[in-house]
Every structure is written in structure tokens, then in C-alpha cells.
Amino acid sequence: MLSIKQLGTIDSPWTAMPPLRLGKIPSGLGTADLFVTISDGDRALLRVDLYGDSSSESDTSQDALVWCEHVFVGFGHWVYVIDPRKQSSSEVFLGDCCGYFSDFYAGQDYLLAASGESLLRLAPDGKVLWSTPNLGIDGVVVKTVENGLIKVEGEWDPPGGWKPFVLRLDSGQLVVG
């Protein structure tokens, strides 16, 4: 069973393992902004070094989870999709300005990724099934997912000026908002 850790620093055995480097990798490499370690039981499987586009990216929300045998990492303006068995990755750009990663919302049949302005539904392989933009300017929060509908709030007038929306889970289509 896959397990992950998000770390600011790493120790052995991870330091001896060649990393999968993601993000804006500096020419001199340097120290990554975030390390993600992936294990299969007690066996160290993969080390991922993440580099942000700027110092502000390390100040935004970051999260990592295992879903459908892939590791999804939200960091800065990106969602990284990692196949630990193949030691490969793909990425989803969340957008400039308010497109910073906010949070993941996972169920058995869905994975949603929220940014500062939109909500995306991802397939198990990381492909974007749909994206609904313009839900907020400084945060999108999923409140509930039930009966094929997603209840969302988007912040339009910070701090605290939230507007409710209802989206279809299958298409991201706006039902109420």
C-alpha cells in the first residue's frame, strides 16, 4: 500500500535516492522547496523534489494524496500527477494570478482540485475531466458532494465575502450560482 510524506528536509535512505525533480528546476539545482517521499509498505519507492516558480509558491497551500495508485501533489500553481511505479509524472497548470492550489477533495469515484478561482475534476491518470473557472478570486471551498452535485463556496470579497455555487459532479456545469 502506497504512503506519502511531505517534508521540508529529508534523511537517509531518501538522500541516497535519485529524485524525480518537478517544477521550475534551477540550473544549479539547489535545495528543493518541498520533498515528497513515496513508500510501498516499508520499502522506499520514490523521492520527489519540488521547486516553486517563486518564493511565494512555498507560502501557498500544498497537499499530497494517494488516489487510484497515483500520487497527486498540489503545490504553487500546479497539480503534479505522479505514477510511482513508472517513476514518471504529468502536470496540470491551475492558472496565473489566483490559480494557486488550494485543496484536494477526494471520494471513491472522484478527485477534485480547488484553486483560488476554479474547481477541476481529475481522472485517475491525472487528465482534467472538466474545469469550472470564475468561482472565486481568493479561494474555492467544496462544502459537500452528494447526489451528483457539488456545493461550493467562492470568495469574491476578501476577507469573508463568500458566494455559494452548485455544480454537477459529472460535468462541472453550473446549476446554481
Image (cartoon, helix red, strand yellow):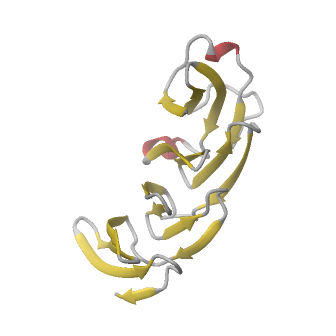
Expressed as whole percent of the image width and height from the top left, the position of residue 51 reads 62, 38
Q: Is residue 156 left or right of residue 125?
A: left
Expressed as whole percent of the image width and height from the top left, the position of residue 163 reads 28, 78
Q: Is residue 38 above or below residue 107?
A: above
Expressed as whole percent of the image width and height from the top left, the position of residue 63 reads 46, 44
Q: Nearer the viewer, residue 153 or 60?
A: 153
Q: Is residue 53 above or below residue 177?
A: above
Q: Nearer the viewer, residue 58 or 110?
A: 110
- Occupied quadrant, residue 166: bottom left
The residue sitting at 49% across, 46% down in the picture is 56
Q: Is residue 152 left or right of residue 55?
A: left
- Occupied quadrant, residue 103: bottom left
Q: Is residue 171 above or below residue 102?
A: below
Expressed as whole percent of the image width and height from the top left, the position of residue 92 reads 64, 59
The residue sitting at 52% across, 63% down in the picture is 99
The residue sitting at 77% across, 33% down in the picture is 27
Q: Is residue 42 left or right of residue 146?
A: right
Number of disc labels: 0
Q: Is residue 57 above or below residue 3?
A: below
The residue sitting at 64% across, 32% down in the picture is 49
Q: Nearer the viewer, residue 8 or 147?
A: 147
Q: Residue furthest left?
A: 160
**Quadrant (top left/top right/bottom left/bottom right) for the C terminus:** bottom left
**Quadrant (top left/top right/bottom left/bottom right) for the N terminus:** top right
